[in-house]
Amino acid sequence: MNTMPAALAPARIRTRRRVFSLSLLAAIVGLLALSGVASADWLTPESGGSANADSIDTLYKVILAVAAVVFFGVEGVLLYSIVKFRTRPGAVPAQIRGNTRLEIGWTLGAAVILVVLAVVTFAMLDDIRNPPNSDADGFPTQRIENVQNAAAYQPRPPNGHALNIEVNGQRYAWRFTYPDNDTNTLNNVFSYETMYVPTKTTVTLTIKAQDVAHSWWIPKLGGKADAVPGHLNFTWFKIPQPGTFRGQCAELCGRNHADMVAKVVALEPAAFKAWMDRKRTEIKQADDAAAKRRAEESRQLQQGQSPVTQELPGKSKGE
Ligand SMILES: [Cu+2]
């Protein structure tokens, strides 16, 4: 007896199959084409700059591998069943209802996979979130709690020492302020766009925003950290070799968001010290020149003359 309803006539099934195949193909092509730059390291997060980025990449690959096994297993059984048990004129399939052993099996299987992934994730999370100590031959650093721009509750290495740099997101640039040993916050070494850091040294970042929400993101140096006005956020990296790492504000922050790039340049500790010393001298010269000019202007005002604005000598070339 043929009980097949008219809706499942062979011609309709062929059309549906064709629509399904074409949709699947379009979805795959679209996914690959549109992901573009967002796909970064093509399939997995970028790594190779800092240990936390490497751990994120490894964790991603472990989960991707497990997910791939599940995906191809399920899709394989699905495709096999579609072909093997497809409708044939006059054929009536076996009328089955439920299979307790199978159902318990795949429920337990899914639970075991989730538990394994949770255990692996929590085991690796520690390496991702918490900074390690600097190497013995790294740049000498202070205890984080003694640094002006650090927060008491931010994650720190076991020995408490790190180079803590303040990252301030502002439309449309990043400002980096380096720690020093006095309480005056106006004479610190700073730079824009390019952050110079020493190799083999744990660098902790205190991230904030001046105006709107931004997001600090140097892919090879770890995950994104939001820069939110009125809120402090933290991340860290430790770079073993000298190199340059590029990134980009990852939060749409306004018209020139695309120009809000960032670069981290890792130098050997001695070269980093030389850079710090040079910047400190430049800033000191500029401050002294400005103080001199202010004094000269107030002297001229007192004498009833109109102050003459002059070009600042020794002005720091912004980097
Ligand atoms: Cu931004």
Image (cartoon, grey):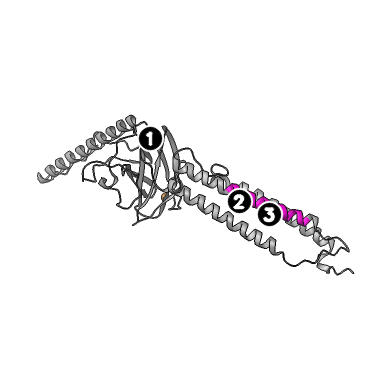
Indicate which disc residue 67 carries: 2
Q: Is mark 3 within 8 Å of ligand 1?
A: no
Q: Residue 173 at x, y = what percent? A: 38, 46
- Point out the image quarter for the C terminus: top left
Residue 256 seen in this snapshot:
no
Tell me the magenta residue range: 64-82
Q: Earlier in the sequence, mark 3 or mark 2?
A: 2
Tag 2: amino acid = Ala
Query: Residue 115 colored magenta?
Result: no
Q: Which residue is mark 1?
A: 200
Residue 117 as seen in the image, left or right of residue 20: left
Q: Residues within 10 Å of mark 2 (few under 14, many from 20)?
A: few
Residue found at x 26% / y 34%: 282
Secondary structure state at the residue bearing disc 1: loop
Tag 3: amino acid = Val
Residue found at x 74% / y 54%: 79
Q: Which residue is mark 3?
A: 74
Magenta region, main secondary structure: helix
Tag 1: amino acid = Lys
Residue 125 seen in this snapshot:
yes
